[in-house]
Image (cartoon, rainbow, N blue to C red):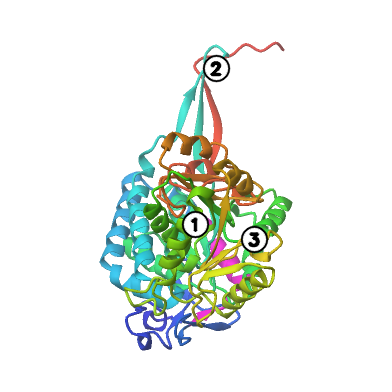
Amino acid sequence: MAPGERIGHFSGHVIGHVIGHFIGHFIGGEWMTSESGRSYRKRSPWSGEVLAEVAAGDGEDARRAIVAAHEAFEGWAGALPWRRQQIFLRAADILERRRDEVLGALAVETGCGRVFGEVQVGFALKLLRQAAQLGYRPAGELLPSDVEGTRAAAVRRPVGVVGAIAPWNASLTLAGRAVVGPLALGNTVVLKPSEESPYTGGALWAEILQEAGLPAGTFNVVTHAPGEAGAVGDAMLASPLVKRINFTGSTPTGRRLAEKAGTYLKRVVLQLSGQNPLIVAADADVGYAVDAAAYGAFVHQGQVCMCARRIYVERPLAEEFTTRFAAKVATLPTGDPSDPATVVGPVINEWALALLERRVNEAVELGARVLAGGVPAPPCYPATVLADVPDEAEITQGETFGPVVIVEAVDSAEEAVARANASDLGLAASIITGDTRRGLRLASTLEVGIIHVNDQPVNDEPQMPFGGVRDSGWGRFGLGFAAEEFCELRWVTVRDQDREFPF
């Protein structure tokens, strides 16, 4: 495939520049079509225009990529640390140079506005630059032995091929998080991006890493048509060459993946859904709480796994907070994600829009009040605040991925914690209070993987242990913890002298 036939010049500045381009698989350092010859059309969630034809891969394409990754593993695992470091630092420089182009691509492909686009690019730059030093971290530790004359060590080694499955909602960030840590530790990777973000969540990373000098086969990308992810995922699970899989997505899909992985005794890292509480204590600064909640609930149209889904406010502050919060939310600009002033852009597709409308309407029919928003403006759904939502409403069950948040008055922050802990999900939470000591005490009782005191829940840094508990997944992303997930720990001993044996 010639370079001009793929989406290498996808800019997002002018939609017409990308119509007719083709996004192929990236396998063994080459761009190629699917074995079947099939493709699908990726459309803009804002304009509906066709952005590109995309290779519609299946299990055969995934198997080709897995073999390429396996064949590249020995060379990459043995690469000297300075060579790996150079590649990741060059990749960061390339991404920095292409910043404006990438921001435009995020807007047209996933409806990502300028604010969250900058968050994604900033994270990816830090990720690459921090990953550049992973090769110099200790690869193990000496252990004391009770056997005289024996020296023992625990030694970490890369596992081999890692299968990475990334979502569309923070496509640049979450694809980068899925692949850069494993690569920096000496593994090779096969990435399956979402059908909604084949470029910013897949091909773009291949372009950057290839230009940076990553050896052929070390990183591979296999795309697929809507509704056809299963064939690629099943190939990753079934292949004995794939030693680990990481997945970011919904709890129902993660549960099915984990069940299948168990059949193959294959370890997986799962970062799944969140029903994230934001607790506002009676002693909080109400203006700060309103601003924090607005960002935490509606950044990127609420299409972030960490977004606040339920806001609990201690009763003395509830009326003032709710009034001011609803007024602020009602003024959030909605529309074209390419406009820097836009806060709430389009939701990812028509199915997502219909689901939001159905769940909000059902809540209203059951007695909920709409304090802001609530009327769809296709392809957008406005920032929406609900109150008096009964527990039996579907919108309170699991994760509703979009710009809708529920506000509820509680008699105490402790009651808020109890209500939050009643959920099966436990990804992120935040507490806003004038008493940080109390905030930390409350944080210690929340059953979640991530807690922020005096902040909203949407935060991430490459070096932090990112992940949830209960039905929000297991394992942790984060460069500081990647070795625990993507390396094998070996016990190695050596004798200084011959040993005596009883027979």
User: Looking at the picture, does residue 280 appear above or below residue 437?
Assistant: below
User: Looking at the picture, does residue 188 appear above or below residue 333?
Assistant: above
Mark 3 nearby-residue class (10 Å; few <14, some 14–19, many ≥20)? some
The kind of residue tagged 3 is Thr
User: In this rendering, would 454 be left or right of 374?
Assistant: left
- Give the label on residue 319, or none: 1
Give the mark, 1 or 2, whose residue is nearer the N terminus: 2
**Camera-side mark, 1 or 2:** 1
**Camera-side mark, 3 or 2:** 3
Mark-to-mark CA distance, 3 and 1: 21 Å
Instruction: Between residue 412 and residue 499, name the one nearer to us.
Output: 412
Q: Can I make out residue 179 in this image?
A: no
Give the mark, 3 or 1, whose residue is nearer the N terminus: 1
Q: Examine the image and state in which quarter residue 225 appears.
A: bottom right
Q: Can I make out residue 329 in this image?
A: yes
**Residue at (51%, 18%) from the top-left corner?**
144
User: In this rendering, would 123 be left or right of 311?
Assistant: left
Instruction: Between residue 439 and residue 255, name the one nearer to us.
Output: 439
Q: Label 3, on which residue?
A: 396
Spot occupied by residue 229 in the image (x, y as percentages of width and height): 62, 70
- Give the label on residue 202, or none: none
Which stretch did the figure color magenta?
A: 53-72
**Residue at (57%, 38%) from the top-left corner?**
445
Mark-to-mark CA distance, 3 and 2: 54 Å
Q: Label 2, on which residue?
A: 145
Spot occupied by residue 149 in the image (x, y as percentages of width and height): 52, 13
